[in-house]
Image (cartoon, rainbow, N blue to C red):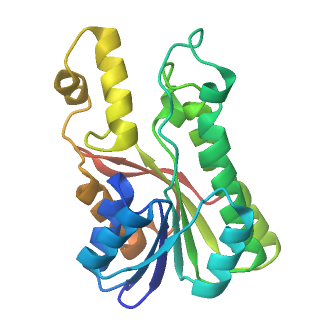
Amino acid sequence: MNLKDKKVIVTGGSRGLGLGLVEALVARSTKVTVVARDPQVLKSVEARLGVGVISADVTDEREAHHILSEVKPDILVLNAGAKPPMGRLDQLSWADFSAAWETDVRGGFYWMQAALKTPLTPGSHVLVGSSGAAQNGSPLSGSYAGAKRMLWLMAKYANGVSAQDKLGIRFQAIVPMQIIGNTGVGDAGANAYARASGISREEFLARFGAPMPPREFGEKVVSVLENRAYADGVVFGLKGDTGITILETAA
């Protein structure tokens, strides 16, 4: 896919992995709209990168439908998510444990429904942010692993709806296979697991091999969109030292 002049929405695109992706998209001359909560951070991103910005809560169902109807993106990237409270199973309240479901899954649910119901135009892509925790678990981050697995499954369910209704919308899940430092979620996880292991944050992150900073993550995601070799993939694993791996293909 040639991304030049394509309209792209990135939720949670003002920080961390989302911002790295926005930078990679801007470098391809796409027309990016960043959706996030903090208006001050959005102003900074708008000034630096020249993107459109919308301050909104991704868990607001009406906002999801309104924004998609107004922007009519060719590509929708669902990256927004909560930084999960960290702790053992016996240390977390239910509110802390369920935080990822209330934000990540709830937001993903509303935006995927809006993409199907608006609907987006045939040929549109929806990229759904998941995590390697969806495969391996994450015992110190409450429901995070289960939430990310649910998003992975929801992308597949949405493909089924698109096929049944002949909408021509493709849903794909993006699965970072390592904890990424200098991001909100990544630092929270790295710090918690490093403390539990009695090592430094740097030593813990080194266990994943080559790092994958946000801009490199963004470049890999853009490759999924640009490279025809990934056209049949539904779920993609991304890692600093092994690049992009197709984890699942269309049935």
How many marks on residues? 0
Q: Residue at x 44, y 87 (%)?
A: 6
Instruction: Examine the rendered structure and indicate whether residue 67 appears above or below residue 235.
Output: below
The residue sitting at the right extreme is 165
- Left/right placement of residue 216 relative to residue 105 reads left
Q: Residue at x 70, y 56 (%)?
A: 109
Q: Quadrant of the N terminus?
A: bottom left
Q: Residue at x 57, y 85 (%)?
A: 71
Q: Quadrant of residue 115?
A: bottom right
Q: Quadrant of residue 203?
A: top left
Q: Quadrant of residue 185?
A: top left
**Residue 171, how many percent across, how many down?**
60, 65
**Residue 48, how many percent across, how many down?**
24, 75
Q: Nearer the viewer, residue 47 or 189?
A: 47
Instruction: Examine the rendered structure and indicate whether residue 110 appears above or below residue 89.
Output: below
- Left/right placement of residue 151 relative to residue 3 reads right
**Residue 87, how many percent across, how many down?**
49, 17
Q: Residue at x 34, y 69 (%)?
A: 22
Instruction: Examine the rendered structure and indicate whether residue 174 appears above or below residue 145.
Output: below
Q: Is residue 211 visible?
A: yes
Q: Is residue 72 visible?
A: no
